[in-house]
């Protein structure tokens, strides 16, 4: 699996935490920044990650900002992206099993690095359940066509 990851200035610490997790897990990743000491605009980071996921350059994406909300709104504008904003472990598993989410968004001003790491670990290792959930995801895909 290859993952594209990015954050704005509000998510740098959790981005680094998740990068260290992916190093430990042996997951290949592309780090798209930011290397920011000043304020940046989250769409400039969300959309490049979302486009890489949508065009198949990477399998999954992870986006972090202050709340995760701006990143998730921007990423979900890209056709083919199912970005889930997650701040608990139950939802991390459920969104992979039920929604086949291909981008995970988290907010560094909402949760700490330990919980973010566990959410990412679960999200990266949980498979889509398919079955009745596939029909539902297909309805989203059909709407996009
Ligand atoms: C930046 O201040 C903040 O607005 C951003 O990180 C994010 O929370 C937006 O949704």
Image (cartoon, rainbow, N blue to C red):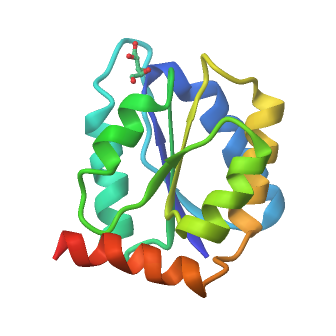
| Residue nearest the viewer, comparing 114 with 142 | 142
- In the picture, residue 36 is in which quadrant? top left
x then y, percent, for residue 17: 72, 37
Screen quadrant of the C terminus? bottom left
Q: Residue furthest front?
A: 132
Q: Residue furthest top?
A: 38
Residue occupying image coordinates x 25% and y 78%: 142
Residue occupying image coordinates x 44% and y 39%: 33
x then y, percent, for residue 46: 34, 43
- Figure label count: 0
Residue 45 in view in this figure: yes
x then y, percent, for residue 6: 46, 43
x then y, percent, for residue 31: 50, 50
Screen quadrant of the N terminus? bottom right
| Residue nearest the viewer, comparing 103 with 3 | 103
Residue occupying image coordinates x 75% and y 46%: 119
Residue 22 in view in this figure: no
**Depicted 11 relative to depicted 99: above or below:** above
Residue occupying image coordinates x 33% and y 69%: 140
**Depicted 132 relative to depicted 120: above or below:** below
- In the picture, residue 144 is in which quadrant? bottom left
- In the picture, residue 78 is in which quadrant? bottom left
**Drawn side of residue 46 relative to residue 12, left or right:** left
Q: Quadrant of ligand 1?
A: top left
**Drawn side of residue 69 relative to residue 15, left or right:** left
Q: Residue furthest bottom?
A: 131
């Amino acid at each position: 699996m290859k993952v594209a990851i990015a954050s704005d200035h509000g998510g740098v610490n959790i981005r680094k935490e998740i990068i260290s997790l992916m190093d430990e897990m042996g997951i290949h990743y592309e780090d798209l920044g930011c290397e920011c000491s000043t304020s940046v605009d989250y769409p400039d980071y969300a959309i490049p990650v979302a486009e890489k996921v949508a065009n198949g350059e990477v399998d999954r994406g992870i986006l972090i900002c202050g709340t995760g909300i701006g990143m998730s709104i921007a990423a979900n504008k890209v056709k083919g992206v199912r970005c889930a904003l997650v701040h608990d472990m139950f939802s991390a598993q459920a969104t992979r099993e039920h929604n086949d989410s291909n981008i995970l968004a988290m907010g560094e001003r909402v949760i700490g690095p330990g919980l973010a790491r566990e959410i990412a670990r679960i999200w990266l290792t949980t498979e889509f359940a398919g079955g009745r959930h596939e029909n539902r995801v297909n309805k989203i895909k059909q709407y996009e066509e």
